[in-house]
Image (cartoon, grey):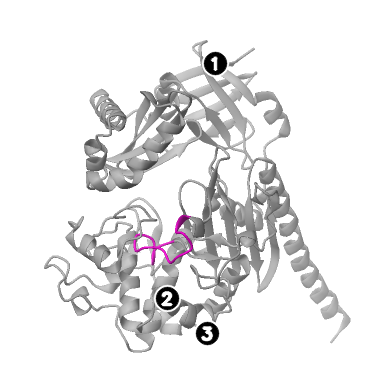
Amino acid sequence: MNKLYIIILLLIVSANVFCQSGSEHSIDMFFKKAEANNFSGNVLVAQNGKIILKKGYGLRDREVNSKENGESVFDIGSITKQFTGAGILKLEMEGKLNVQDALKKYFPNVPEDKKNITLHQLLTHSAGFPGALGDDFNNISTDDFITLAFNEQLLFKPGSQYEYSNVGFSILAIIIEKVSGKSYEAYLHDAIFVPAGMLHTGYIIPQYRDDELSVGYREDGSRWGTMPERYNAVSPGWNLKGNGGILTTLDDMYNWYLALQGNTILNADAKEKYFEPHIKEYENGNTYYGYGWVIEQRLEGKFIWHNGGNGVSLSTFMGFNQQTQTCIIVNVNVGGKVSDDYAIKCLDIMNGLNASLDSNVNMQYAGKFLLNKKDTIQVHFDEFDRLITEYTSPEVFQLLLLDGTEKAPEIENYNNKTKNMLEALFTKDYTLIAKAWDMDAKEFEDNAGKMWQNQAEESGGFDKIQIIGTAARRGANAFITVANIKFKQNSVYMMYVWRGDNLVDARDINIPNKVFDWENNTTFSAANNNKKMVLEKGNIKVISELGMTILTPLK
């Protein structure tokens, strides 16, 4: 080998090592900044078959001041669906089923409108089942779940469109049990987890210790707990099993990624189905659904990923790019922090997109500003250099959240609908809220209703409802309404997402806020309503198609 060739080779190797070590340092510095801003969780980043960062940040358990160290056990939420998909494909490889099989093959008494739904349609969220049938932690039996699911009215003709459905994946898990003769978890353990080297993955088989579990905390710092606490250390019921709730570690999920690069679990034909972009998720989007995976075309190539979480305290993201041999796994155990955001930031850093906000901007503009000299807006900047506004007044809601397409009757309708629904909680009349969720009033009373009554008792009783406002989200064909449920001693803010007369999502929020993404050192923008925040001479200009409003600093 000549000297010139050796020198060139050393330069290439050195450049690759520098790139990886540079990425590691930049990613670590970002997460240290995030940790100072209340981030808590675990991160693994790998490239070219090597782990370049594996680390924990923040606290695993605040009660005992135990730190995250990259080894804790965490909930992966809906990432569970990829294991259900793999289980179905594994059984197909063994000749025990076919993804084109219809439900009537496995359930003799399936109703006429559902008998020809295929496993493929369940796997791709195109069967027409609703998103959920009840609380994740209801200990509902197999027979009761199937009866409930089969009595549901389908949202559309099977195969005609996409609608994300936990129900469909739970039905797939029941089919895995029928075909394999084992419990869902036992089958995954034997056929997938053990061969892939994932000995700390499952619901209860790994027998997790309390001191290895990552504890979830709400955005306000209150304890949500762990998944085993929530399902009482017994296998969860069918509202969760098959679609969510599996626990794992960074090492196990990385072993899963490695297994999928070879044929340890699935052969080439099965993986082609697994990662095929079968159906578009959203009309205006660029993501497709495979069999438990989201397929997205990014600048750096095809990115295969999925996320999961409870919307309150826990979220996890796993994604990889086979062309660049990049794998990213992020787990978060505190509310208000979304694992997806951190994973994409890791990708950006690895792609050299690491510009940051001038610290002087943060120092000058973080603080309180006034709208019309009376309504207060708290402004701060997060680890993503986003401008975060927090507020409590309806006037600020209208300024920051409306997209300009709303009509007064629409806003009044959802404001009144939400207020009437929530005021009924005071009298324990759950008719309106249960109807909005398209569920039985007794079912609501036994689950969410008890939660609300317990919270009222602990807080001195209900006081009143304040509606902060309603805004359109045309891209999602929805409206969001923010409300303040006031008790005698405290209050809680809630955000409700309406589609027509039905609620499709609800979550408690620490305080109403609006996020603006950074464009440059002085301009921030909001994607969903085209509003901009421009920092200028100590003031903040809010600019939209309707005009400009100036926010002045609170002296």
Residue at (19, 57) in percent of width and height: 152
Kind of element beneath mark 2:
helix
Q: List the single residue furthest toward the top.
A: 373
SS majority, magenta: loop
Of callouts 1 and 2, the N-terminal one: 2
Residue at (58, 61) in percent of width and height: 329
Query: Disc 1 marks which amino acid?
Result: Leu
Residue 264: numbered disc: 3
Residue 86: numbered disc: 2
Q: Which residues are magenta?
A: 230-244
Q: Give the left or right position of residue 230, taking residue 160 as reference.
A: right
Residue at (33, 89) in percent of width and height: 95
The 10 Å Cα crowd at callout 2, few under 14, some 14 to 19, many 20 or more, is many
Q: Quadrant of residue 45?
A: bottom right
Q: Which residue position is annotated with label 1?
A: 370
Residue 530 seen in the current view: no
Magenta stretch: includes residue 228 = no
